[in-house]
Image (cartoon, rainbow, N blue to C red):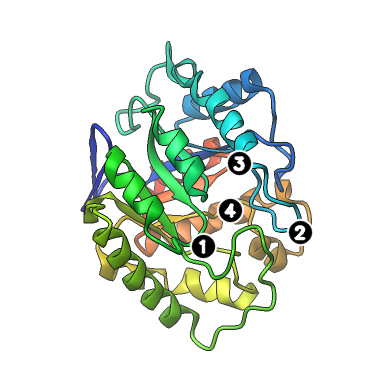
Amino acid sequence: MRLRLRERVISFPRRPLVMGIVNVNDDSFSGDGTLDFAAAVEMARDKVRAGADVIDVGAESARTNRAAVDVAEEIRRFLGFLDRWDDVWSGLEPRDADQVWPPLVSANTWRPEVVEAVLATGKVELVNDMGGLPDARNAALCANAGAALLIMHSVGEPKVPHVHQQWDDVIGAMLAFFREKLELAAAAGLPDDAMVLDPGIDFAKQRDDNLTVYRELALLQEFGRPVLVPVSRKTVIGEVLGIDDPQERDAGTVACIAASMARGAQLFRLHDVEAAWQTVKTLDAL
C-alpha cells in the first residue's frame, strides 16, 4: 500500500504517521487555537520537533455549536499560516529515521473555494475533508493539484449537529459510504493511491456507534487504502471515562491509538504529539 502525494510517495507498512493538530482559530474545542500566525508556527514547530509527520492545520473549528467562518476569512487564516510553512521545520532535524521529512502539511477544510485557494500555494499535500465528499469538486481539485484527499465518514452538512442520528448498522453503512465515495473520487480523476479513509469518530455517531467503529476498524482494510483515525480527546473518550474536560483525555487517547493500531490504522490525528510518538514507536517495535 502507498500514499501518493504531490512530489513523494509514502509506502506502508511502516510506523504509523502522527498527525499533529494546529488550530488557526479562536474556538477550538480543546482550547488550543490561536489567531496569531507566529504562535501557530511555533506550535507546529513544537509538534514537528516532537516527531509529527504531518501538521493538520485548520482555520475553523469543527464544533457544531458555532457558525461556519466566512470563506474569505478562512482563506486568510490558511494563507497566513502557509506563507510561513517553511519556518515550521527549517533548522530542525528528524526525530528518528522514520519521521516523514520534511513534514507534510494537511489542510483541514471542506469548502471547494477554500480547497482551491490552499492548493494553489503548492504547499498542501493532503486535504482533510470533513465534509463527507457530497460531490466530486474537492476530489477533482486534489487530482489537478497532485494532492491526496482524506474522505471522512459522516452524514449531512458540516458544522451542523447530528446528535439524533441513529444507525441500524453503522459499519455496514460506513462500508457502503466509502465504496460510493471512492468511486466518486476516482471518476473525478483522483488516483486510488491518493485517497485516505477516516471513520469520522464522533461525527454523526453516538457513544455506542463510536465504540463499534473502534472494535470493527479492521473491516476498513478491504479498501486497501490508508486509514486515519482522529483519536484525540474525543467525546466518546470523555463519555467512557466520565471526563468533561477534553484536555484531561490524553490517556484515553493513547488507549485508542493502541486499539486502532492493532486493527490496522496507519495515521493518527491528535493534539499531544509527544505521547502519540512514544506510543506508536513503542508499539511498532513490539
The residue tagged 2 is: 243
Say above or below: 156 vs 51.
below
Q: Is residue 174 left or right of residue 212?
A: left
Q: Position of residue 88 (x, y in %)?
A: 49, 20
Closer to viewer: mark 3 or mark 4 = 3
Q: Amino acid at mark 2?
A: Ile
The residue tagged 1 is: 200
Q: Amino acid at mark 4?
A: Thr
Q: Residue at x 38, y 61 (%)?
A: 262
Q: Are marks 2 and 1 in contact (CB under 8 Å)?
A: no
The residue tagged 3 is: 71
Closer to viewer: mark 4 or mark 1 = 1
Q: Residues within 10 Å of mark 3 (few under 14, many from 20)?
A: few
Q: Nearer the viewer, residue 213 or 278?
A: 213
Q: Is residue 218 left or right of residue 73?
A: left
Question: What separation in Å lies between label 2 and label 4 (alpha carbons)?
Answer: 12 Å
Q: Earlier in the sequence, mark 4 or mark 1?
A: 1
Q: Residue at x 27, y 49 (%)?
A: 194
Q: Earlier in the sequence, mark 3 or mark 4?
A: 3
Task: Return the mark for residue 264.
Answer: none
Question: What separation in Å lies between label 2 and label 1 (alpha carbons)?
Answer: 21 Å
Q: Amino acid at mark 3?
A: Val
The residue tagged 4 is: 253
- Quarter location, residue 196: bottom left
Q: Say whether residue 211 is visible.
A: yes
